[in-house]
Image (cartoon, coloured by chain):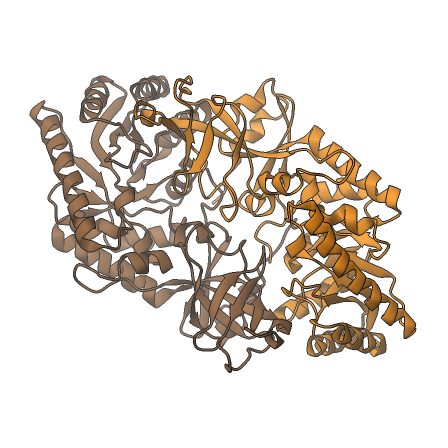
Chain colours: A orange, B brown
């Protein structure tokens, strides 16, 4: 079935932002540009490379903006994201999750063969490494691999330093593989709001990682890349001298969750909220009930639901709060005595957790002040 | 960027189900067909019509199967769903949520003009009704409306019986509108697992609704349609004599949430689980840790997260449990001493809440036993 986003017709129209068909996922282009510039400058200042994670935005356009600002490449969680980024001409695409099933390995090798600007993949298992080596050899290509080290997160990654050494040796020996370095993502440290605790835990991991890289080099294994980190620990990690590059992703948009975790920033300006959902009031019969509310047209199919609730950014009475109210509806509670929003009134909400919220939409509505300036596809949404 | 689902090539191949590119949203076609047949027969036996809710499946194919089995039409929550269902040739499309913003009303009137097999919309506000009447008159069409009554749920719907009477009178008087009846959805009663409590609360609502319909008819207002209900209360509501039709949706698939709520069914066979996600083991380094686990490739971008956790249906050691482990990964914990799953092993998981899980995927992988027989698009996903 063909279906056209009705907001396309509003691009460039005066006041288009106030007339969007809702719910609409929106990007504040000024804030996005500033966030991209701040992170690029910060990493440049530290002499550390930036290979931002596209799992946040899944957008070729935003990835290109990051590379134009100095990023050396793009990280992807899923193979489908990597296929989209390579098709979009992005350089230095790195897949941060192991690819193990036969169909994924077939796709990976085919992608590597056409990724002329670089492709690497994380590996955390010797048997997987052997399968990749055989598949790359059969295809007549050289596949770049990074040994994934769990760093206490234990989602993926080799569990011990010895396991990383074994992976590095095996990769160095496999003729169709090229060992490119080590990946270590401390996902469990990203969201610690207590800065002293986060620093202490990060330093423990950094010390282990530094020792591991030294051990590899002591064996004569080249380790050109040490990659990892995220928005929550990018400052600690970039200053550590251990990482050669940083994989942060959420900084482009920010969200309720990251604003809470980063309220006490280490230094420098914090990132701005560049992502929000515009929703409209569609029912107001709840306003007559004590503890009144109105119903909006964005619910649990329009926001990530595994974290905090969305938070009001603009529109709606001061002090109003949002709660989920079913698949396609939200409840906007307002303080006693506040003016009751009218049918059709717009409310803009900060997303609870940016990555899985973006994953619910086909398109970004890109605004500057009151104007819808562009509509960008969420290119890699749903691509696994 | 063009991107093709790699599983298309497996359609009809022997043992294709075991070789799916993962994570894959799957439909057990036998179970789906049985669920559709059971509900159709049950409603026919009660002399009540069925207008199932497509917000669950967002699929033209499944909607057509429901109509072929006797459903008189299809309910939609969003206008985008209705546009897709009308384009798919479905009859009797009813939009269960008020449409209030200018862009939605413009689209609604345009849709009504081309919906030759019927279109109705819920209305819960007199000012909205007046705007709809003017828009329909300007377009030279007659728009069918149902007065939405909140029934204690208060998400949408008029708050009082008097408000419903006012809406019905105003609709009856508007030349471009046609009053078609009353909608009343008791969403808050759908998921009550304690059957006696559910029955009691449903009976209170049914008695109020029955009185309301009688009051409308006593005024000489025709009420051809009394619509509402859901999978959780379809038996109570169909037997009530109040509803002329039932809007149940989730019965086609079922999920962890509905199986818990419906464990003590009132009568007749229960619906089967017809929807699941197939995921593969992608990392097993966590298996060496006490309280061992492996990591699979389906995480919080692959399941609804606002309810219970996904539950193991097949694959994996007996007694294994699933927990979310980030955007694209899950943690499969297994009992001490159980065999550790191998890399690439498949696990099939019941979805926590079917509607918002389906909303995360572009396609259904339709299986019969071990064969992938078809791939269906989730036609209305992302259409608001």
Judged left or right of residue B174, residue B334 is: right
In this view, B182 is above or below B274: above
Nearer the observer, B169 or A38: A38
Q: Where is residue A74 in the image (x, y as percent from the top left)?
A: 75, 51
- Can you say whether B119 is above or below A108 in the image? above
**Horizontal arrangement in the rendering, residue A41 relative to residue A1 (left or right):** right
- Residue B96: horizontal and vertical position, in percent? 32, 37
Could you tell me which residue is drawn at 57 percent across and 71 percent down? B294
- The quarter in which the C terminus of chain A is drawn is bottom right
Q: Residue A235, position in %: x, y? A: 78, 46
Quarter of image, res B152: top left
Q: Is residue A248 visible?
A: no
Which residue is pictured at 28% across the width and 20% down the height? B176
Above or below for A170 versus A227:
below
Whether residue A294 is visible, yes or no, is yes
The residue shown at (44%, 59%) is B309
């Amino acid at each position: 079935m063909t279906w056209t986003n009705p907001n396309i017709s509003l691009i460039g129209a005066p006041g288009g932002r106030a007339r969007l068909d809702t719910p609409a996922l929106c990007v504040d282009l000024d804030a996005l540009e500033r966030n991209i510039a701040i992170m690029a400058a910060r990493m440049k200042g530290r002499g550390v490379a930036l290979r931002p994670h596209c799992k946040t935005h899944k957008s070729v356009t935003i990835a290109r903006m990051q590379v134009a600002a100095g990023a050396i490449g793009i990280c992807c969680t899923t193979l489908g994201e990597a296929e989209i980024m390579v098709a979009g001409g992005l350089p230095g695409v790195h897949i941060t999750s192991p690819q193990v099933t036969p169909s994924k390995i077939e796709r990976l090798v085919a992608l590597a063969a056409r990724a002329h600007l670089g492709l690497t993949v994380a590996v955390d298992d010797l048997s997987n490494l052997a399968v990749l080596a055989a598949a790359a050899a059969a295809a007549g290509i050289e596949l770049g691999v990074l040994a994934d080290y769990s760093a206490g997160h234990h989602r993926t990654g080799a569990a011990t330093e010895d396991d990383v050494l074994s992976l590095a040796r095996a990769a160095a020996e496999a003729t169709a593989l090229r060992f490119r370095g080590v990946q270590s993502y401390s996902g469990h440290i990203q969201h610690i709001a207590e800065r002293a605790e986060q620093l202490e835990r990060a330093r423990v991991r950094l010390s282990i990682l530094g020792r591991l890289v030294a051990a590899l080099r002591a064996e004569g294994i080249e380790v050109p890349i040490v990659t990892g980190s995220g928005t929550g620990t990018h400052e600690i990690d970039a200053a550590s001298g251990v990482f050669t590059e940083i994989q942060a992703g959420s900084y482009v948009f920010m969200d309720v969750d990251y604003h809470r975790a980063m309220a006490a920033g280490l230094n420098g300006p914090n990132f701005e909220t560049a992502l929000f959902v515009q929703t409209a009031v569609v029912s107001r019969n709840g306003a007559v009930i004590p503890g009144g509310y109105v119903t909006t047209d964005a619910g649990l199919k329009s926001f990530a639901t595994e974290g905090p609730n969305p938070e009001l950014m603009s529109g709606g009475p001061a002090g109003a709060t949002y709660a989920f109210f079913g698949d396609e509806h939200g409840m906007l509670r307002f303080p006693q005595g506040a003016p009751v929003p009218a049918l059709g009134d717009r409310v803009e909400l900060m997303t609870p957790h940016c990555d899985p919220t973006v994953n619910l939409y086909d398109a970004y509505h890109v605004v500057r002040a009151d104007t819808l300036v562009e509509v960008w596809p969420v290119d890699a949404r749903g691509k696994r």
